[in-house]
Image (cartoon, grey):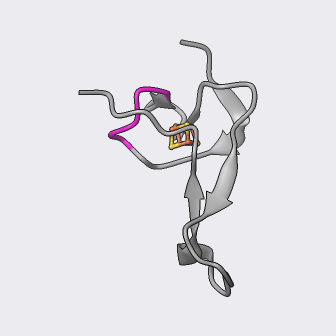
Amino acid sequence: MEANRHIGCNVNNCAYHCKDCNCCSLDHIEVGSHETNPTKSECTDCRSFKYKG
Ligand code: SF4
């Protein structure tokens, strides 16, 4: 797994998470929203997330 320090992330449960740098190991991620009119960061989601379990 190669750390991508350009994408910081603290979602430990993701298969792509690097805990050494608290970042993502993907080159590219897809971000979206589960809201029709997002107004806060909490409204956004990483759609590249994959459960590590
Ligand atoms: S895919 Fe998304 S949730 Fe998973 S480590 Fe990368 S940025 Fe975080």
Question: In x, y percent, where is residue 30?
Answer: 69, 43
From the image, give the main secondary structure of the stretch colored magenta.
loop
The picture quadrant where one finds residue 45 is bottom right
Quarter holding the C terminus?
top left
Up the image or down, 36 lies above or below 52; here it is below
Q: Residue furthest top?
A: 1
Question: In x, y percent, where is residue 14?
Answer: 40, 36
Question: In x, y percent, where is residue 23?
Answer: 57, 38
Left or right: 50 with respect to 40? left
The picture quadrant where one finds residue 6 is top right
Left or right: 17 with respect to 4? left
| Viewer-nearest residue: 49 or 3 | 49
Q: Residue furthest left?
A: 53
Up the image or down, 51 lies above or below 45; here it is above
Left or right: 6 with respect to 43? right
Up the image or down, 31 lies above or below 12; here it is below
What is the count of numbered marks?
A: 0
| Viewer-nearest residue: 29 or 2 | 29
Question: In x, y percent, where is residue 35?
Answer: 58, 76
The residue range painted magenta reads 12-16
| Viewer-nearest residue: 41 or 18 | 41
Up the image or down, 44 lies above or below 39; here it is above
Task: Assess whether residue 53 is covered by the magenta stretch.
Answer: no
Q: Residue at x 53, y 75 (%)?
A: 42
Task: Assess whether residue 15 is covered by the magenta stretch.
Answer: yes
- Which quadrant contains ligand 1? top right
Q: Residue at x 67, y 87 (%)?
A: 39
| Viewer-nearest residue: 30 or 26 | 30
Q: Residue at x 60, y 25 (%)?
A: 25
The picture quadrant where one finds residue 34 is bottom right
